[in-house]
Image (cartoon, rainbow, N blue to C red):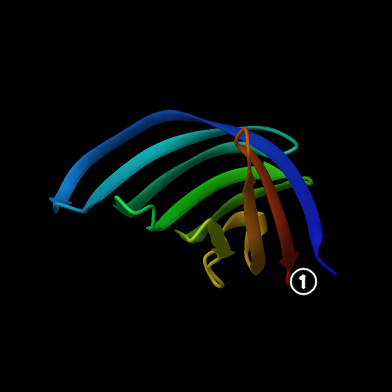
Amino acid sequence: MSKRVTGSFTFSTWEGEDVVQWDEAQMQRNKGAKIFTGDITGTSRLECVMLGSEGGAAVYVGAERLELEFDGLKGSFFLTHRSMAYDGKYDKTLVIVPGSGTGDLVGITGKAEILPGHDFVLEYDLES
């Protein structure tokens, strides 16, 4: 049965560089570091690519390594990010990479959600 834990994060660093610029769109590579507080504590490093058009369509893909402590567990894991915005719709998916857990988080699977205000929700299962 999945467990759910929540926290918040702030960016301690955020850097972006223009990779490609077209007349109607831009692609940018970004990297940042986060600090988590609340029922989830720790840090992470994120790298992502964002592509946006003047018409409002956008896509974002990224990979993040999180070193966290929650529910009495401590370790790290990878999280993939994928989101798209189009026609006023928004679709996002954040998934824990199976097999990436270390420490107490070996065997972790699940997903995450980022809410407005940088609130973070983690739903996870842990193999025994």
Vertical position of residue 67 compared to residue 36: above or below: below
Residue toward you, 94 or 124: 94
Name the residue: 25% across, 48% down: 28
Look at 49% across and 35% down and name the residue there: 34
Q: Dividing the image into 4 quarters, which one contains the N terminus? A: bottom right
Instruction: Report the side of 45 relative to 37 (left or right).
Output: left
Quadrant of the image containing the C terminus: bottom right
**Residue 120's spot in the image, x, y percent?**
65, 43
Q: Nearer the viewer, residue 102 or 70?
A: 70
Q: Position of residue 69 (x, y in %)?
A: 67, 42
Q: What secondary structure is marked by label 1?
A: loop
Q: Is residue 85 left or right of residue 3?
A: left
Q: Nearer the viewer, residue 113 or 27?
A: 27
Task: Say whether residue 50 is left or right of residue 100.
Answer: left
Count of all numbered marks drawn on residues in the image: 1
State the image coordinates of residue 15 (x, y, percent, origin top left): 29, 34
Residue 40 location (% of width, % of height): 69, 39
Which residue is label 1 attached to? 128
The three-letter amino acid code for the residue at tag 1 is Ser
Q: Label 1: how many residues lie within 10 Å, few (<14), some (14-19) or many (20+)?
A: few
Rendered view: 40 above or below 112: above
User: Quadrant location of residue 93?
Assistant: bottom right
What residue is drawn where x is 58% and y is 37%? 42
Q: Is residue 96 above or below residue 98?
A: above
Closest to the observer: 67 or 114? 114
- Residue placed at 46% from the left, 52% from the top? 65
